[in-house]
Image: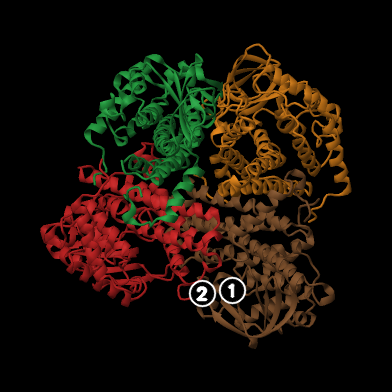
Chain colours: A orange, B red, C green, D brown
Amino acid sequence: MDLTYSEQEIAFRAEVRAWMAEHVPEEPLPSFDASREGFDAHRAWEAVLNEGRWGMVTWPEEFGGRGLDLIRWLIFEEEYYAARAPLRVNQNGIFLLGPTLMEFGTEAQKARFLPKMATGEEIWAQAWSEPQAGSDLAAVRAKAVRDGDDYVLSGHKIWSSRAVYADWAFGLFRTDPESERHRGLSLILFDLNSPGVVRQPIHQINGEHGFAELILEDVRVPAENIVGAEGQGWKICMATAGFERGLMLRSPARYQVAAGALARLAHSRGDALDPVLRARVADAAMNAEAYALSIYATASRLEAGGKIGAEASTNKIFWSEMDIALHETALDILGDRAELLPDAPGAQDAGTWLDGYLFALAGPIYAGTNEIQRNIIAERMLGLPRG
Amino acid sequence: MDLTYSEQEIAFRAEVRAWMAEHVPEEPLPSFDASREGFDAHRAWEAVLNEGRWGMVTWPEEFGGRGLDLIRWLIFEEEYYAARAPLRVNQNGIFLLGPTLMEFGTEAQKARFLPKMATGEEIWAQAWSEPQAGSDLAAVRAKAVRDGDDYVLSGHKIWSSRAVYADWAFGLFRTDPESERHRGLSLILFDLNSPGVVRQPIHQINGEHGFAELILEDVRVPAENIVGAEGQGWKICMATAGFERGLMLRSPARYQVAAGALARLAHSRGDALDPVLRARVADAAMNAEAYALSIYATASRLEAGGKIGAEASTNKIFWSEMDIALHETALDILGDRAELLPDAPGAQDAGTWLDGYLFALAGPIYAGTNEIQRNIIAERMLGLPRG
Amino acid sequence: MEFVFTEEQQMMAEMAQGFLADRCTTADLRKLTDSGDTFDADRWAGLVDLGLLGALVPESAGGLGLGRADVIQIATACGAALLPEPLVDVMGVVLPALNDLGQDALVADVLKGAAHVALVHPDAQLVQDAPRGTHILVMTPEAVTLAGAEEVTLTAQPSIDPARALSSVSMDGGAIIAQDAEAFAQVARSGAAGALFAAAQLLGIAQKAIDISVAFACERQQFGKPIGSYQAIKHHLASAQVAVEFARPVLHAAAAPAATAARIAHAKIACGRAADLATRSAVQVHGGMGYTQETDVHLYLKRALALRRIWGSETDHRNRYAARLETSAFGPDTLFAKEA
Amino acid sequence: MEFVFTEEQQMMAEMAQGFLADRCTTADLRKLTDSGDTFDADRWAGLVDLGLLGALVPESAGGLGLGRADVIQIATACGAALLPEPLVDVMGVVLPALNDLGQDALVADVLKGAAHVALVHPDAQLVQDAPRGTHILVMTPEAVTLAGAEEVTLTAQPSIDPARALSSVSMDGGAIIAQDAEAFAQVARSGAAGALFAAAQLLGIAQKAIDISVAFACERQQFGKPIGSYQAIKHHLASAQVAVEFARPVLHAAAAPAATAARIAHAKIACGRAADLATRSAVQVHGGMGYTQETDVHLYLKRALALRRIWGSETDHRNRYAARLETSAFGPDTLFAKEA
């Protein structure tokens, strides 16, 4: 147990900080979920990041990474968020598909997809859920039928994040038409610009369209685009979901930076601040620290050879509830300014907090609802019997 | 809508207040759940109450009541709690069995049981649940076998409130041995001093023994002690449970008095009081008022010919959660004195709050756990499908 | 003591509910806001015709001469219907204030739909629908000022709720119509009315959010059965319903003539919390759909978010309630006590 | 940066856990308290033999010379086992303080079991097990006084937790062994240690309360299936486990040499809340049985109730944390910042 940074870690932090100070755009980029222009600006930022070899520091050097450990990844993320660098339009690729390909992909797939993922040249969407499936991924009905050297995809996907503007998608398809539930599913990569793909933006509560519905009609995909063998999709997808809910979906620095901003917002009220809100601000800061400490502990454990298990579900619950509470506290401090849109003249910083609050409301729902996560904790971590 | 008391109601309040001022014992009686002495002291108090015709003001005059409406019952309860009069050792009788007998009992049963219930001469225990049944009353296995003019009872009852010292009990028994679940159950009254009845006190978390286990071995009961017909027990019991969870199990004045005491405890801290605790004290007072207002509204609705339905379950959830929060706030104000027993020299009033807290913890469990109540609200009030 | 609505009160409420069911569906609301508007002149004319604007104005001044308890359920219905036009504020706050202040001619104009008065109050500084206003009434504890539309400068302040067309107001002129103690008292009276009727709307939103969630949970299948059969979903909605059940009687008591400021504060807090719990549970029950604009959930969520924070925040109202608790006795016999 | 325990740390913890599993079951505890006692001399002798009392005392003074991170898991194990003897306070607070204050001979006596020193501290005014004490150490911010047992008057203050034999102490004599700045610093140091190790015990209680509830919920049938298969029960226990998961790393970080007072405050709050949630969920999951003395639930509940409120209340610790938040920068790079 040593909770001090090594000299090398300190030097690494300094290196990240210096680079970010020089490269992070002064003005925030427009959202990548609201316009093609914002999307492209973020894609350009990914290219800049990649030039600095900061795309994904844990990746091997051959794929554009630095082969660093998870502690350094955390330090990188801390400096990244502290510098208020743009959100990662590429997160489906670098955090979800990338690690999956490295574990389950062929050499050809890695060579074909990883470098362009790292540069942002190809931005990825995910295509898991379906209108009648929701959190029940095993209910997937979209199918992939083998036809010569191709798969022919058809079906209806929903909640495909980034899919409105992205280039490629990875999704679960039923390759065995006789199969039920989680058997007979496969993970297949497809070009979103293929004939037969229709993208319908979903208008989110906050007016953005970070998700799309995808209507797939006879979309032809080379058979080599399957990841792993036919029927292995569920297993691979669960490994990915573990990663998603686990370490990378929400890096702790995001909340530490938000809690710091909340503390400053509270401080600006001086003595007029309601002491109950003061206590909630302290709670927000404590939670942000608890989450960060927990992730550091998990990262250390993984580096020491441990595995990530059902505690990924505890992370999901914790960050999603913390995120809502943190932003709600900000809205309560803002009072009657809370409802104002960012471009309202009287909003000042209120609009950003409102955006963050609405965004946070999705947290307990996506990547498996918190109800599902609590079931997972109860059954897999505590050993309670299945319903 | 008229939220002012009539002159008659004001006069009635004055009458109760005057009588209580004269008759309520100056020193609190010892608990009726901790010793025979305490039990008998409370029984004696019931007799005094009955002499004043205050046993149960809503009962008809012929059974010792005054035939008053529910609003007057509420006023009575308000003055009763405000005067810090003893808790009702008789509550199983006057609030649960009494109304049940008036609705479902024979004339002979009413004449035999109600007057002695009103005077406290016979104190009643309930005998519903069983060791493997818990909140699942339909799982009752104790049986009543008809044998000539008698029923012969055998089985095992648990959570029989007051049964350690009480005289009589009412309970659910399976009269049809072939029946399953809630069919074939009957409500039967039996003398706790009958041969074959063994009472085993259950030691509660707070050291008292308000409940007993009852082991019944061939207990002979006259057949006329059945309430309603054979097989009607479940229906009758549900009507009683509705009453219990509804209006009478916890009268609002109890919480208003407790919240008033909490406000004084908080006030005694002056400026040293944590503002977060101050907010929780305000919450406790608001909740006590909300509960009282809700009960007044229900009482008015019943007087206007309405029926009590699934909202009895909302009451149960509300008062039980409020009770815990209220007492927990007191413990948090008391700080390191909170753990002291009432007889610790340093406890001052802390012991009473601690007792109240521990007692409150039972609230979400008994008379149907709050989980069951939420199911009831969801299914019967909101119309969600059964699990 | 009779804590039930009279038949007349019930009939009034049903009349308003019927009107809103016909004329103010969420489809109507979406059509209106999609066209960039927040005010349906036909619907407003209908409300004017029903006489609801003047419900609290004395009959001698052309109103219905009713009390708050007579119309509290109407305000709840307006909340449930997400009525975009400012009936509740005009009926509950603005016209009673103008009447208090002796502005009889203006009251008459508003009642017949010929004038529209927007209100700026310390507890509601951004005004709804001001550009349509012929007059602006500005209250401060020092003075109440009435200005014509041409005497003020409006700045649009867009809200997350597309049906709330908010503006901030700066005064370039106007006439002072009350000062000092009278202004101070009017601010308190109008503030209490504003909080009470905002609470009523919040309660309506809360119940409606539960109702649409129940309907959704009965339909939507997951893991082979309706999601409403899962205990977690049941308990979310049951808890929200409990919050509604114990906010409703507080609200109704707060509408009584003798209600204290503390009781109104309590109602605002309780209804606000119920609406918050119910709308957020609605998002959760609707899952991904709850996070889109395809279902109606977001409309209730956004209205609740706004109404909870105007006409006094939870902090403000808690302080009011706590102050009374600390300076007055508290017990069963103070439940229906009159204002000190 | 290595946020995992070393093999040695892990072995120490397992050794203590093994001892407690053998010698301190809840059956042992019930036997002890049923006999009216709260101290098992044999068990204490075993703990003395293991050398645990002096874990934090330098080797030069006869201890093991370890740090807080080396023993934090032992304190957690003592909490989980509901150990009635005051190992945690003696090891974590009393002996380090006596060593700080140069009381070498007394330290040596305590280490070999020949003396017992009870501590009165502003954050823990009622002392455990004082009648058995040969000495009483009384800390105030002005002075630290060491008195012999004959120089104090004890008043028994019975606790709801039958294993906590508490007394209040009034001093009739004794020697001042530190004053002013030194006393002030010692009060802070001992207070932080007391809070840290109370937090550790609370975490142990929390996990244990969950574990026994899981076991019960797998066994107990209701409506024809184990109650643990109902979502409501699952979610109660899952929520408690989430609280434990995010209290544990805070506790461990608070045991680091450079931990700030704010971090220790955070640990006390987080572990206290986890224990509260877990023990109350345990009562609820156990149903009626959870409300009796027949299961062990009440033992955990009562210990948690006490430990949450000594060595600083949630109010105290929140104020400490908030004060730091308001006077220092907060961000990712302050996570492992050293004490200012």
The chain ID associated with circle 2 is B
Q: Is residue D290 above or below residue A38?
A: below
Query: Is there a contact, CB below 8 Å, between mark 2 and mark 1?
Result: yes
Q: Residues within 10 Å of mark 2 (few under 14, many from 20)?
A: some
The answer to whether residue A197 is left or right of residue B270 is right
Q: Pinpoint residue D290: horizontal percent, then vertical percent.
A: 46, 61
Q: Is residue B352 above or below residue A229?
A: below
Q: Which mark is residue C1?
A: none
Q: Residue at left 65%, top 41%?
A: A268
Q: Pinpoint residue C168: horizontal percent, then vertical percent.
A: 54, 26
- Judging by the rendered image, the residue that carries numbered circle 1 is D126
Residues at marks 2 and 1, CA–CA distance in whole angstroms: 10 Å
Q: Residue at left 58%, top 55%?
A: D274
Element carrying mark 1: loop
The answer to whether residue D145 is left or right of residue D36 is right
- Judging by the rendered image, the residue that carries numbered circle 2 is B346
Q: Amino acid at mark 2?
A: Gly
* Outermost top residue: A195
Can see residue C307?
yes
Q: Pinpoint residue B278: horizontal percent, then vertical percent.
A: 50, 54
Question: For the C terminus of chain B, which image quadrant?
Answer: top left
The chain ID associated with circle 1 is D
Q: Pinpoint residue D14: horizontal percent, then vertical percent.
A: 71, 64
Can see residue C237?
no
Q: Residue at left 24%, top 47%?
A: C1
Residue D133: name its quadrant.
bottom right
Q: Residues within 10 Å of mark 1 (few under 14, many from 20)?
A: many
Q: Amino acid at mark 1?
A: Leu
The answer to whether residue A9 is left or right of residue D75 is right
Q: In this rendered view, identify the residue nearer to me: D144 or D254.
A: D144
Element carrying mark 2: loop
